[in-house]
Image (spheres, rainbow, N blue to C red):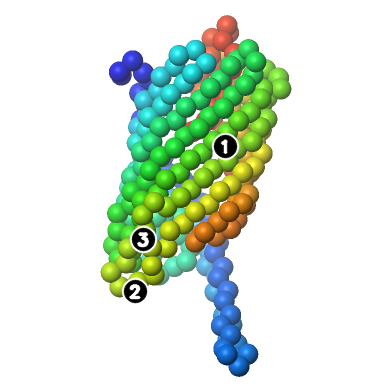
Amino acid sequence: MLGGQAAFTVLAAPGNVGVGIGATLTGPRGNSISGATIDNRTTLSDVFYQGTLKWNQGVHNEMVYITGNIPSGTYDPNRLANLNLGFVAYDAGAGYTYLDPKAGHEFSVVGGFTYSLMNPDLQYQNGVDFHLDWAASQFVSKNVHIGLAGYFYQQVTGDSDPGVKLGDFKGRTVGIGPQIGFIIPISQEYQGYLNLRGYRDLDVENRAKTWTTFVTFAISPAPPASVAPISRKN
């Protein structure tokens, strides 16, 4: 399509979510009141869909994408633990990958904007946000690469709420961490790709400051024998 490779993906996933909140209110005379609550549940995520269009010119690779979600029936506005958004969101953007199989250099960057509809249960709407994900790595052997990965998130417009006014509540996060990837030959026709990466938030505003780890595994058609293996990234 348009000289590129088009693809469409639909996915959903089960998961377990545990949330705990604690707070202490201290008065002007030093008296304080404390409270805490926890919630845990195993449930299903929303259904997510994504359409992509990719082009390749030697070591240069470009991509445009659009993605969104279909809210599932497991969202509960009265519970802390939810694996679902509770509202519909749309995301669109573009990406670029530089991959030199001979030198083993790889650099990828993907940026996009997200627009969210109002949560009908809470009457709350998130603002438009901009997000940028990047990764740089070096192949240390034919099937192993190591490097760094990071992200930048900045809310462009404020949240809106017809009831209690919380201000624009714009969020921002910046994170970085290591990554390692393994290309695993399965057969002459297929190969696997295993990636492990972790992030630590360095700069946070109106968001929880956390660390995050990801383990992903994908199976795809193997490249021709004359072509060096290519790292697989979402």
Hey, what amino acid is under mark 2? Val
Instruction: Name the residue: 38% across, 36% down.
Output: 93
Hey, what amino acid is under mark 1? Thr
Q: Which residue bears the numbered disc 3?
A: 159
On screen, residue 93 versus residue 220, left or right, reads: left
Label 3, secondary structure: give it. Answer: loop
Label 1 and label 3: CA atoms lie apart by: 32 Å
Q: Is residue 224 above or below residue 141?
A: above
Residue 48 coordinates in the image, percent (x, y): 38, 43
Label 1, secondary structure: give it. Answer: strand
Using the image as rendered, state which of residue 198 and residue 37 is in the foreground. 198
Circle nearer the N terminus (2, 1): 2
Label 3 and label 2: CA atoms lie apart by: 12 Å
Given the current orientation, which residue lies at the most extreme right position?
140
Q: Is residue 9 above or below residue 131?
A: above
Mark toward the viewer: 1 or 3 = 3
Q: Quadrant of residue 138?
A: top right
Q: Which residue bears the numbered disc 1?
A: 216
Instruction: Name the residue: 38% across, 63% down.
Output: 168
Disc sitting over residue 164 in the figure: 2
Instruction: Name the residue: 35% across, 72% down.
Output: 165
Instruction: Name the residue: 33% across, 48% down.
Output: 115
Residue 230 coordinates in the image, percent (x, y): 56, 20
Using the image as rendered, state which of residue 101 and residue 231 is in the foreground. 101
The N terminus sits in image quarter: top left
